[in-house]
Image (tube, rainbow, N blue to C red):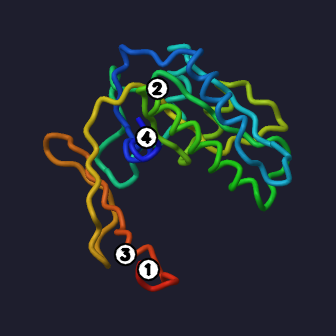
Amino acid sequence: MNLTEIAFNNRSFRRFDQSVPIGMKNLEELLELSRYTASAMNKQPLRHFLVADPDKCDEVFKGLAWAGYLKDWPGPAQGQRPTGYVIICHEGEPGPWSKVDLGIVAQTIMLGAVEKGFGGCMLGALKKDIIGKALDLPEELEIMLVLALGLPAETVVVEDLDPGGDFKYWREDDDTHHVPKRTLDELIVAKYPAADE
């Protein structure tokens, strides 16, 4: 796949084939990929917990909230849960650029996962006390984001969002997941020159 294909296939997947483990080697390779990304002032303040052990995955899963717009869905059932996690933490007090570093690292890992044939979901709605206890989190680290990873086991469809339309994702009765995205024309405020020349 080229970068365009990887980016297009990088959806937020919330159901996985739990019989196919992502494995620690893949998690380490994804983190290695992110190690080469930019960092504000080159401080590199992020630290990571890599989780591929099934029992530890179960512990982390208990600290996650899934798909806030799907009010009647409690999250993936047993057999459809992630087989690996990257828990991204910040060492020390986060600064004004910490979330920029976080976004760069998280997206790089997600794109790398797609290239390897996997997928995932970035989760920010967390029960940090549960996850912290599962990881025996050191006091100097703050959990910022969890990347849930595995082999996707659902269909996600991207649709153009009409201006002023509802941006909330939704599911059909067959569990096909629909994600409205703003069109390119809506995202562009102005173009200089105004037309192709």
Horizontal and vertical percent for residue 17?
Answer: 33, 22
Picture layout, residue 174 above or below residue 100: above
Q: Do residues under tags 4 and 2 come within 8 Å of each other at their CB atoms?
A: no
Residue holding disc 3:
185
Whether residues under marks 3 and 2 lie with C-beta atoms below 8 angstroms apart, the answer is no
Residue in view at x 40 percent, y 52 percent: 68
Mark 1 neighbour class, 10 Å CA radius: few under 14, some 14 to 19, many 20 or more: few
**Mark 4 belongs to which amino acid?**
Ile
Q: Do the residues bearing badges 2 and 1 touch, measured as CB atoms within 8 Å?
A: no
Of mark 3 and mark 4, the one earlier in the sequence is 4
Q: Secondary structure at mark 2?
A: loop
| Relative horizontal placement of residue 172, taking residue 114 as reference (left or right) | left
Foreground label between 2 and 1: 1
Q: Label for residue 6?
A: 4
In space, the residues marked 2 and 1 are separated at their CA atoms by: 39 Å
Q: Secondary structure at mark 4?
A: helix
Place of residue 40 in the rendered image (x, y in percent of width and height, measured from the top left): 80, 54
The residue positioned 50% from the left and 33% from the top of the image is: 148
Q: Residue at coordinates 31% horizontally, 43% vertically from top-left?
A: 73
Q: Amino acid at mark 2?
A: Lys
Cα separation, mark 4 vs mark 1, equals 30 Å
The dot on residue 197 is: 1
